[in-house]
Amino acid sequence: MFPRYLTVKPFLTRPVLYYGLCLAFSSWFAFFIAVTVDLPNPYWAAMPAWVIFQPTRGLLLERAIYRFVGTFIGAAIGFAILLIPLPPIGQLIIFTVIIGATTTCSHIFRGTIAYGFFTTGLTLAIVIIPSIISPNDAINLAISRVVCTFIGCIVVTIILALFTPKFPIRSFYQKIHLLTSDVIFYSNQIISAESKEECQDIEQTILASINDINDNAAIAAAGSVNKNRKLRYIDAIVAASLDVMAASRAILTRNQRENVLPSEFSDDLLQLSKQISHKQPFNIADCDFFRKWQLDNAELKPEIKRLLYTIQQLLAAEDALLNNVEQHRSFISQNYSSTLLLPHRDWYMALNIALITCFIVFSVSLSCYLSELNLAEQVASGISIFAIVFGSFPLPQNNAPKLFVGVFSGVMVAMVYRFWVQPYIPDTFWLLTTLIPFLLLAGICRAHPKTAIPAIDANMAFLFAGHIGMPAADAFTILSTDIIYVLCAGIICGMFILLPRKPDSQALNAILSIQRDLDRMITSQSLVNKHWYQQSTRQLLRLMLHLSRAGKLGDGAPNGSLSTLNVGYAIIMLHAKLEQAKHDHTHYIRIKTILYILSLKPKGNLAIIKTLNEQIQHIEDSDIRRITEMLIDSLTESQPFFAYINELKKKST
């Protein structure tokens, strides 16, 4: 028997062969239609198959729709620019500005709509650059390419949709249900623990699960209006899960000052977790836990009431996901108030990417236009298209090697086709026949998980560089055009590797955003509103995303991230007390002093914590004192989180 490390999984598994054949046939059939109607450059019809293909039907349909709409809008804008009575350089400037806008939007918007903006920019470049640099019949050629793209989108979508499975929504909802149970189990463990280190492993596991659910929510909802409406409930579950965990950690730190846990509360919470894990959907109205532990119970400490409220919100959000909360006649309909996550808009990153992309596209297009060289149009188109493609990637330095390998491989296969197959094709029948083995190989590579990413660029490069369906060319034309195509890919890959966006830098920006939010809350009472929590929760999710990309979501993730939510919660409570203390000068001054001390940077500084401990000795009001103690405990716990800023700063420089 071979050792385990010598076993090799077969490359041609049944799913790979199945989807490979579907992809090959859909691409071939779209090409067949374009050839039959005698369109120039028919290979453009075969291209959409490689980018539209997705593992689930809903995502495939949504991606195809945005490909179609993006192509239509990009072509319409492109032809409109060409009709503007401006010199070519003026048209290039307008074109570049719109490319900047589409690139920015592709990073600002969530889900497959970002692909629509990317496709708009890509189509715009395909229309504008050839028409300005090589105006001879370029508009007719651009129209032909757009029509071929429409044909490819329609044909490929219809064929692939018949053979692509739906998203396993039931298993996804089951994962959300298990998350609910795990979060409440974590709450039981943390409130009864003697130290926060005891629950660190389960906390990281739950945070990873939350991050996974948040990432897959849009995929699960793709292609369905009803499921897209339910995204707000998944957001509410994610936000409430973090809120429950943060409230539980607040109880842990409070227990070190005084015992706030009522007898049997921890056991009842554990029993609630077990009940939820064994029953789906879980009906909160039939639950003994909330009949026993009421929010209006005057004997419960504020920390316990906060935890009860957050648990209710978590269970209510799950119930709202599985049912129509507006029509649901239960305890939920009276007590549910959705805490939605505000979509994150990383304008700084998006604008930086847009500026880099615009600079590349405009400088190269202008240089090629002024040079008047024979191959100028191909160079400008190649570099601009690759720049726009890279501008859509979240981590281009990771994609660069795969893209270059894919482009190089596709061009090599295209050269084989152009030298040893294309010159000997006598008619359309043999053109379609000889293309089959190439597309079969392309489909299998695209369907295999290990080669799927580079195969996209390889297949596109094969069709583009191979000029499939076009007359045979001489050796010099083949070599010059294909080498330029590879060089364009290499130049852009190299540029984006030299200008990388690292996960560490993005994680640093996420932490700094949380810190800035806290600063605004401290210094400006008017900014304390219900949106703060949603914004900070989204920032924590964004931080987890970047840490997972950096391979640090586990042991390398900073401790104390959840405690920053408790810091913000304490600041909000202080501002609420400040409103009440306007007529009590002593209490008003005390709260103002605490907020001033807190405004000193950094938040996790031991000197600030020491000063707050000194101030607390002079606070007579029990509520203000309790809030200040919570603030001190949360700052102490969140010190590793803010200290992580310095570590990331060193790595990002």
Image (tube, rainbow, N blue to C red):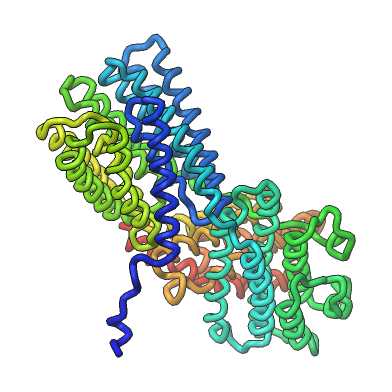
Q: Residue at x 32, y 12 (%)?
A: 87
Q: Decide which of 295, 370 is in the foreground and name it.
A: 370
- Residue 563 higher or lower than 55, as above or below: below
Q: Is residue 586 visible?
A: no
| Image coordinates for residue 116, horizontal then vertical, percent | 50, 39
Residue 6, given in percent of the width and then of the height, sits at: 28, 81
- Look at the image and tell me in which quarter the N terminus lies: bottom left
Instruction: Residue at 32% x, 29% y: name it.
Output: 41
The answer, for residue 647, to whether it is visible in the render is yes
Q: Is residue 285 left or right of residue 449?
A: right
Q: Is residue 79 left or right of residue 250?
A: left
On the image, the x and y values in percent for residue 412 come to: 19, 47
Most extreme residue toward the left, as rendered? 476
Measuring from the top left, give residue 33's x and y in whole percent.
Answer: 42, 33
Q: Residue at x 13, y 37 (%)?
A: 479
Decide which of 360, 611 is in the foreground and name it: 360
Number of callouts: 0
Residue pictured at 62% horizontal, 65% vertical = 172
Q: Which quarter of the picture shows residue 28?
A: top left
- Relative horizontal placement of residue 49, taking residue 234 as reference (left or right): left
Question: In this rendering, is residue 324 above or below 109?
Answer: below
**Quarter that holds the C terminus:** bottom left
Which of 257 and 195 lies nearest the eye of the viewer? 195
In terms of depth relative to the viewer, which is nearer, 479 or 21? Answer: 21
Q: Can you tell which quarter of the image residue 10 is in?
A: bottom left
